[in-house]
Image: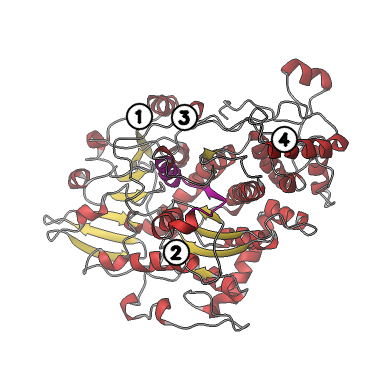
């Protein structure tokens, strides 16, 4: 039985993004006229004209003729942003058609965020110290006071937050400052916003990981003029010291490492249910914040101007809403943007999978047999990393195109049920549900390691292990032994949740690329004139993907080659991009 699903589908031809303007060669002098004309057209409601990116966002982005010189200026430490910017156009909205697997999660079915206490009475609970993921935890969280039962106050007298320990704020601030050093693009956006606040009057509720890297994004949104309230999308990934640093700066954050299921939804509700404050934007990772507002506060959901969703799971849920005619606000799909797919999903997982496995198991990779479920960008990253360390890698896949890629990359394609008896590790990278079920785990050999690198916490059927004949034995933080009656044991990591965010960290630089994309998506949706975006799910135009990439090139002292006029004419391109058609696969 093999129900693995490619975690990051590459089916872009079925979802053409908003096309980019092919004529980007007008001067910065003509750019302002183009902006005014475009906005007048949008105001007239002429659907025959392609919508243009918001003027506020345009004033922050480089003009078509200026973005390359700006890159050089950034490398020299000079001012980057210019008020004279050219128009960046988008093509009309196109419907996204996507095929769902048979076991797609219904939007109305709330994601299970089962806390540690609900798994088994025999589990020794994981540490809540964000700096001790790889060590053993001596304290029993049952004896700890829940943050919900404590009244904390920061140095400014503010109590609008709920975190583990406000005393960790100084340590968290140092971590955030370290992250800022590598998140150069977000810092550039902050600098550009000194004269204008493109998110002024925006009230953003967010449900993402609360880490040093995402804290840089939160504070950037605040500098851009937004009011924000935040909760964690994962009960294990919160860095308590970072949450404390945010709370100390009067940032309403409701998150701590080791939340229970009830805590998880309580924190989300605290972000939304505020007297005299109504959200008008949502930044989500997994769809939980969107789900909560849609189900519990439908009157608020109708007032939201836009949703920015980062993960494949959340995108599936949005498309289910859209298909049912219940999506009453526009949304931008960050997950399928080039910058997210090719950098965050691939390079981030390629590095963090090894670190996570070492910290939790101290395993030797050389010679180990590993089954990777799913060969999307996450699966590709994990497979490449383990192969480079000498592991023998099997891949399970439902998509024949991804399957052929795996074979051409030197991996053996198999069904999980055929190899599960002799592999040493099983890693899910799909975003689907029940990829590894009880029947698979019954067949695993003694000591087999089971973990998840996909977005969904339902890829491994952990609930099927909560039966009387099985014994849960806690070994260390994020590591449990599940013992069968005959003495066989499997090693379950992070209780089936996302491993690298539960037990390790991820590269700051890669997350900077995704965070910059999210910030630009929020700016675009919030400033878009009424009618530009319908109640559907959109992709960012490729021009913005290229812009995000250009902001990050300065780290490598990179120098781009420029097309000559003759070359640009021969290729049918603007000298300044976009350089690839919307259907191009990088």
Q: Along the line of sight, which residue is nearer the eye, 189 or 390?
A: 189
Q: Earlier in the sequence, mark 3 or mark 4?
A: 3
C-alpha separation, residue under disc 4 versus residue under disc 1: 55 Å
* Residue 551 x %, y %: 71, 45
* Residue 463 x %, y %: 23, 55
Q: Earlier in the sequence, mark 4 or mark 1?
A: 4
Q: Along the line of sight, which residue is nearer the eye, 471 or 71?
A: 71
Q: Earlier in the sequence, mark 3 or mark 1?
A: 3
Q: Secondary structure at mark 1?
A: strand
Q: Nearer the viewer, mark 2 or mark 3?
A: 2
Q: Nearer the viewer, mark 3 or mark 1?
A: 3
* Res 11 label: 3
C-alpha separation, residue under disc 2 versus residue under disc 4: 39 Å
Q: Residue furthest top?
A: 570
Q: Earlier in the sequence, mark 2 or mark 4?
A: 4
Is-magenta flag for residue 233? no
* Residue 249 x %, y %: 63, 73
Q: Quadrant of residue 145?
A: bottom left
Q: Residue furthest right?
A: 29
Q: Which residue is mark 4?
A: 41
Image: magenta residue range: 302-321
């Amino acid at each position: 039985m093999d129900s693995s699903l490619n975690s990051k589908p590459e089916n872009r031809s079925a979802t053409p993004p908003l096309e980019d303007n092919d004529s980007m060669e007008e001067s910065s002098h003509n750019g302002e006229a183009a902006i005014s004309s475009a906005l007048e057209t949008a105001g007239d409601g002429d659907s025959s004209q392609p919508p243009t990116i918001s003027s506020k966002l345009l004033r922050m982005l480089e003009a078509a003729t200026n973005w390359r010189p700006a890159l050089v200026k950034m490398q020299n430490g000079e001012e980057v942003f210019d008020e004279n910017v050219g128009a960046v156009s988008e093509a009309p909205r196109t419907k996204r058609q996507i095929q769902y697997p048979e076991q797609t999660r219904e939007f109305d079915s709330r994601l299970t965020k089962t806390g540690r206490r609900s798994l088994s009475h025999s589990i020794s609970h994981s540490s809540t110290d964000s700096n001790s993921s790889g060590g053993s935890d001596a304290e029993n969280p049952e004896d700890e006071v829940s943050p919900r039962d404590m009244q904390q106050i920061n140095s400014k007298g503010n109590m609008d937050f709920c975190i583990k320990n406000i005393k960790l704020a100084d340590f968290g601030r140092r971590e955030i400052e370290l992250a800022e050093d590598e998140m150069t693009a977000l810092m550039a956006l902050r600098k550009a916003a000194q004269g204008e606040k493109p998110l002024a009057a925006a009230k953003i509720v967010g449900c993402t990981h609360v880490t040093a890297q995402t804290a840089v994004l939160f504070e950037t949104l605040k500098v851009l003029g937004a009011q924000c309230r935040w909760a964690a999308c994962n009960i294990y990934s919160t860095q308590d010291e970072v949450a404390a640093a945010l709370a100390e700066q009067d940032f309403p954050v409701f998150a701590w490492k080791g939340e229970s299921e009830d805590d998880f939804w309580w924190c989300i509700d605290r972000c939304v249910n505020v007297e005299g404050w109504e959200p008008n934007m949502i930044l989500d990772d997994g769809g939980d914040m969107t789900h909560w507002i849609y189900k519990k506060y439908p009157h608020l959901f109708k007032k939201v101007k836009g949703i920015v969703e980062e993960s494949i799971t959340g995108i599936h849920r949005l498309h289910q809403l859209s298909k049912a005619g219940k999506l009453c606000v526009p949304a931008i799909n960050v997950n399928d943007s080039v910058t997210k797919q090719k950098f965050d999903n691939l390079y981030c997982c390629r590095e963090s999978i090894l670190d996570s496995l070492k910290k939790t198991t101290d395993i030797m990779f050389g010679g180990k047999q590993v089954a990777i479920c799913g060969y999307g960008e996450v699966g590709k990253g994990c497979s490449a990393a383990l192969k480079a360390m000498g592991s023998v890698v099997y891949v399970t896949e439902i998509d024949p195109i991804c399957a052929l890629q795996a074979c051409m990359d030197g991996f053996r394609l198999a069904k999980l049920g055929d190899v599960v008896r002799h592999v040493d590790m099983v890693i899910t990278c799909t975003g689907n549900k029940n990829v590894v079920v009880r029947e698979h785990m019954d067949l695993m050999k003694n000591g087999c390691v089971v973990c998840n690198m996909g977005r969904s916490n339902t890829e491994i059927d952990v609930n099927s292990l909560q039966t009387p004949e099985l014994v849960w034995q806690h070994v260390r933080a994020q590591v449990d032994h599940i013992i069968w009656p005959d003495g066989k044991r499997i090693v379950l990591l992070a209780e089936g949740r996302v491993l690298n965010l539960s037990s390790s960290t991820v590269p700051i630089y890669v997350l900077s690329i995704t965070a910059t994309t999210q910030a630009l998506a929020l700016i675009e949706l919030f400033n878009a004139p009424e009618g530009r975006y319908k109640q559907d799910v959109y992709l960012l135009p490729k021009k913005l993907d290229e812009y995000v990439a250009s902001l990050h090139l300065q780290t490598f002292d990179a120098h781009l080659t420029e097309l000559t006029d003759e070359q640009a004419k021969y290729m049918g391109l603007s000298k300044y991009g976009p350089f690839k058609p919307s259907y191009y696969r990088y």
